[in-house]
Amino acid sequence: ALDARRGRFGELQSLKAQGIIGENRSGYVEALSQNASATAIVNAENADRKLIYRAIADQNNLTGAIATIEAVFADVQRAKAQPGERVQLANGTWVTK
């Protein structure tokens, strides 16, 4: 999952810069427009993130803590977002950073 994420990093960043996708409040990327190639990348990225979140929970004996891990990761992604990228705040509002 980590290698796959590295492989799509450039394309993901490009789509974020264009406002086609954004970081949602659940720790996943979300397509913000109807775009088939973006949707495929979003689905692949989110599947890998879900695997990573589960691995973190398993390795740390945090059963039932996936939502907390997702929220922490969402906070990190919001903080790391570049100016002009779309992020969803914890209250559900989408903003441009």
Image (cartoon, helix red, strand yellow):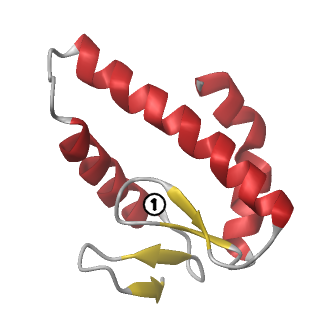
Amino acid under disc 1: Lys
* Residue that appears at 56% across and 64% down: 30
Q: Position of residue 70 (x, y in %)?
A: 31, 47
Q: Position of residue 1 (x, y in %)?
A: 60, 24
Q: Residues within 10 Å of mark 1 (few under 14, many from 20)?
A: few
Which residue is at the front of the view, 26 or 72? 26
Task: Determine whether 37 is above or below 46 in the image.
Answer: below
Which residue is at the front of the view, 59 or 64? 64
Residue occupied by mark 1: 80
Q: Point out the residue furthest to the right here.
A: 37
Q: Give the quadrant of residue 38.
A: bottom right
* Residue that appears at 35% across and 86% down: 93
Q: Give the quadrant of residue 33.
A: bottom right
Task: Determine whether 20 is above or below 39 in the image.
Answer: below
Q: Position of residue 34 (x, y in %)?
A: 76, 76
* Residue that appears at 26% across and 53% down: 71
Please, what secondary structure does the residue beneath circle 1 have? helix
Which residue is at the front of the view, 10 or 48? 48
Instruction: Classify residue 59 as left or right of residue 32.
Output: left
Q: How many marks?
A: 1
Instruction: Classify residue 41 as left or right of residue 43.
Output: right
Which residue is at the front of the view, 93 or 2? 93
Q: Give the quadrant of residue 65.
A: top left
Q: Position of residue 84 (x, y in %)?
A: 60, 83
* Residue that appears at 69% across and 34% down: 6
